[in-house]
Structure formats: C-alpha cells, structure tokens
Image: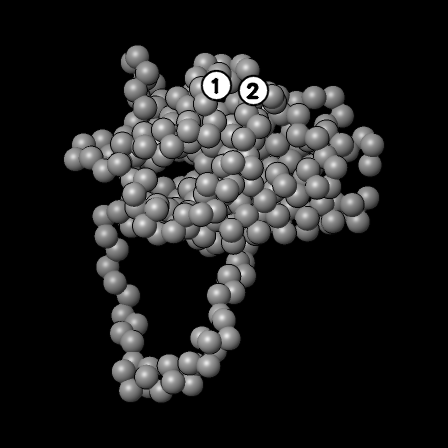
Amino acid sequence: MQDRKKVSLVLSSGGARGVAHIGVIEALEESGFEIVSIAGSSMGAVVGGVYAAGKLPEFKEWVCNFDKIDVFKLMDFTFSTQGFVRGDKVFNEMKKFMGDISIENLNIPFRAVATDLIKKQEVVFTSGDLYTALRASAAIPSVVKPCILGDQYLVDGGVLNPIPVRHIERLENDLLVISDVNANVPHIPEKREHADKRKLLPWLDRWNTLFPKNNKQKAPSLFDLINSSVDLMQDRISDFIVEESRPDILIKVSRDTCATFEFYRAPHLISCGYQECKQAFYEFDTAD
C-alpha cells in the first residue's frame, strides 16, 4: 500500500449530487490516503476548494442542516435575462466560516474550471480569489448569472469539462482518482420509512385504491427542459472523459441519486459517496 498513499483527485460537476464528493474525501482519508492535488468543475470545484482550504468539516455541518426552505432562501432571485439566480448569496454565507482566501495559499494544489462563453473555451483558475473561482465554476447556464471578469462571461465548468482530468497536477507515484457523480449506474433509493409510517401503509393502500393517483406525466417546464438538457450533455461528456482518461480508480455515484438543487438530501448524498468510494477501493485492492 505504500506506493498508493498519494492521490490526485478529480471531482466532477453535478449540482447537488456533488455533495457526495464529501463522502468520497472522508473515505479516502479514513483509508489512510493523502490527497495531494485536486481539480474540480462546478460543485466538484466547490467541495474541492473548501477541502483544500481546510474547511470541509464546517462546510459539511452547514450543508447537512439544509431543509427545502433553507435551499430556497439561498436562491437570491433576480429578473435578469442571463439567469434567475444571482449566485452570490450562497458564497457570502460560506465566507462566514471560511474567511477570505486565495487559491495560491490553499493547503493543497487546487484548480477550478469554468467556461468562457465569449471565447468558447475553458478557463482554469490556479490563483486569485477562491470565491470568484468557485462562483464562476458553478454558474449553471440560464439559471445562475454568469460571473463577469473583464471581457470574460464565465459559466459552469461542466459545460465543456465536467471531469477536468487534464488539469489535475500530478505527482510521482500518485493514484489518479476520479469521483464521478454523473455515472450511468443504478441508484439505491434512500430509506425513509419509519415504524409509524409503516403502520399507516394498509390505510394508505386503501386510500390509493379509492382515490388513485393521476400517473399521467406532466409536461416539463422551461426550467426542467434547461436543467435536463444540461445534465444530459454533461453526462455524455463525462462518459467520454472517463473512458479516455483511464483513471487508476473510478468512483461512480448514480446520476439518478438526486436532482440538481436537492441539497437538503446532503446526509444521504455524503453516505452514497462514502460507500461508493469504499467499494471502488475494495475492488481495486482485490484486483491486484
């Protein structure tokens, strides 16, 4: 195991599913691995940047206390035609427990990837203000307003590169580990039933018999269309990148684990990341 201790970690985009990266990092540390380099897109950049700043416990505690109302309150809505969420409020909240920090002063080499809509190319942040990099990398097109830096209109890094493998800083004898939260694998649903609810099941069955649900599929809203289109695009690009990059270890979290803004499911998402990471390393070890 001595030649496997160092890990260069790539964290994918994926909206709220990116919270699962927290569980991946915790599993890596628990198994005795040292994360020596991180690259991320979108939510992968957020989790990676927070970890590199040494503030993952505070971030985890914050996000694990979200309910649906908390998530809604963090949406600083605007009437802008560039996006209906400003995207500043959540990062201002993060500053309260992180403070001001520059990328070059992080504990671990870190790179965040965004997309320049004007020049139609990737932008890789390796220095400067951490929050600016994270805000730009996580700006979902048409949902969150672009981050404007000079003549650059920066949006979500996942648009062009949801798994930024080629931007990771590699070290000698390291392991390349990819955490992909857009994987085309089955998802085991979260267990939410309690004893009291189970007692009600016979009554609920009778109710549903008398008043059956309308299973007719609703027409998707404009937001649903945009969100699903972006997700599908990133999923397909992710599949290609994973196949091409051939990582030492690939951690796969199902793309069906949750929707883009379901951050209130953070505890379950973290558990998924942790379990999938443990499974991936078990398979890696047994394959040797």
Q: Nearer the viewer, residue 151 or 32?
A: 32
Placement of 86 over or under 150, stated as above or below: below
| Residue picked out by circle 2 | 106
The spot of residue 241 in percent (x, y) is 54, 36
Where the C terminus falls, by quadrant?
top right
The spot of residue 109 in percent (x, y) is 59, 20
Estimate how packed mark 1 is, as few (under 14), some (14 to 19) or many (20 or more) residues with alpha carbons within 10 Å: some
Q: Nearer the viewer, residue 27 or 8?
A: 27
The tag earlier along the polypeptide, 2 or 1, is 1
The spot of residue 230 in percent (x, y) is 36, 42
Residue type pointed to by label 2 = Leu
**Left or right of 216 on screen, residue 60:** right
Residue type pointed to by label 1 = Ile
| Residue picked out by circle 1 | 101
Q: Secondary structure at mark 1?
A: loop
Q: How is the image coloured?
A: one colour
What residue is at 38 percent from the left and 85 percent from the top? 203
What residue is at 49 percent from the left and 70 percent from the top? 193
Q: Secondary structure at mark 2?
A: loop
Q: Nearer the viewer, residue 122 or 260?
A: 260
What residue is at 39 percent from the left and 21 percent from the top? 132
